[in-house]
Structures are given as structure tokens and as C-alpha cells.
Amino acid sequence: MIINCKKCLGINNKISRTARGGSKDKKYYMLQFGDKNFFEFLLELGLTPRKSKTVSELKIPQKYFADFFRGCIDGDGSISISKHPESKYPQYKIRLCSASNNFLDWILKSCKRFFGVAGGSISKTDKSSVYTLTFGKSDSIKILKMIYLENVICLSRKKKIALKILGEWRNGSRASLRN
């Protein structure tokens, strides 16, 4: 994913490894760069330093929202397939996690506006400081059809699941969209 990021930004910066939390094990990859103009552009969009809990509504143009949302899923989200325990119909879900409920609320409203989804819910367990936005089967299909329209730069393991869902849906699971 970091290599994809370098390609998109057109930079040749070094990829390094870093540790997180109190760990000394440098198992996470990092691409660090400094560009004042790019930093100011991100601020104009609504991003701020140390944004995890404070990020809220962003100024993402509609024509880029699908790419933006796909990037969010690649970073802090998941796409999953499971079988309903009773009906055995496939269950498709898209989830996005964030420490900011306001950000997920904005994402949900934007998905309704740009992708035409009808549902979606935000939840948080008592034991967690993280909120989760979840889309069910029919909304997941609508979203996946929009964010994987063409050959896009994305995390390949998540795209593989998305394309499997879209393939199953195209090959006969349409009748089970009620689930």
C-alpha cells in the first residue's frame, strides 16, 4: 500500500519501518515526506494533525468521494463475506472504524448521498474507544459497485473480497438481497 501511495504522489521518498505504542519491534512500514503545499491542501480539506478523535466532515469533492472512501476501507475498514447461520444465504458487510463518531456520521451521510445507500449504522461497545460504521448486504453491494468501477489503486486483498462479492451477486445471489 505504501508503494501505491508513492506512485500516486509521484515521490521517491524512502520507505522505513517503525514501532507503535510501547513496542520496540519495528514491524510497521512508514512513508514520511514534507511538502508545505500538500500539508496546507490537507488542512483546507478539513484534516488536522493528530486527527484520530477530532476528524469530522471533510471537503471531498463528489468526483473523488468513491476513491476517498475506498482508501478509508483500505486503511481502517473491512469487507467480509459470511453465511447466515439459519438461511445459509451469503452475508456481505463493509465496516469502517474510527475514534471519531462525527467522522463516521459524515461518511454515512455522504454514502447515502453519493452511493444511494438506504441503511448503515454506527455502533460502539462499552469496552472500546472506537466507533464502527457497518453497511449490510444490499448497501455493501451498491458501495462496492461504485468504488471498484475500474482498475483502481487499492489494497489487493480487500479488492479480492470485493470482487468475489460482486461476482457472487452477478451470478445468482441477487434474490437473496433481502438479508
Image (spheres, helix red, strand yellow):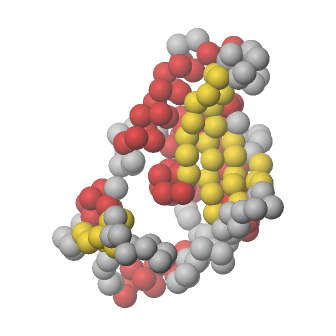
Q: Quadrant of residue 15?
A: bottom left
Q: Is residue 54 left or right of residue 156?
A: right
Residue furthest out toward the right: 126
x and y percent of residue 59 in the render?
A: 59, 69
Can see residue 38? Answer: yes
Q: Is residue 45 left or right of residue 84?
A: left
x and y percent of residue 87 in the render?
A: 74, 15
Residue furthest out toward the bottom: 36
Residue at 72% in and 63% down: 128
x and y percent of residue 66 in the render?
A: 52, 50
Residue at 78% in and 57% down: 125
x and y percent of residue 99 in the render?
A: 66, 68
Can see residue 149? Answer: no
Q: Quadrant of residue 122?
A: bottom right
Residue at 54% in and 57% down: 76
Residue at 32% in and 84% down: 34
Q: Is residue 87 above or below residue 1?
A: above
Q: Can you say which quadrant of the picture contains the C terminus?
A: top right
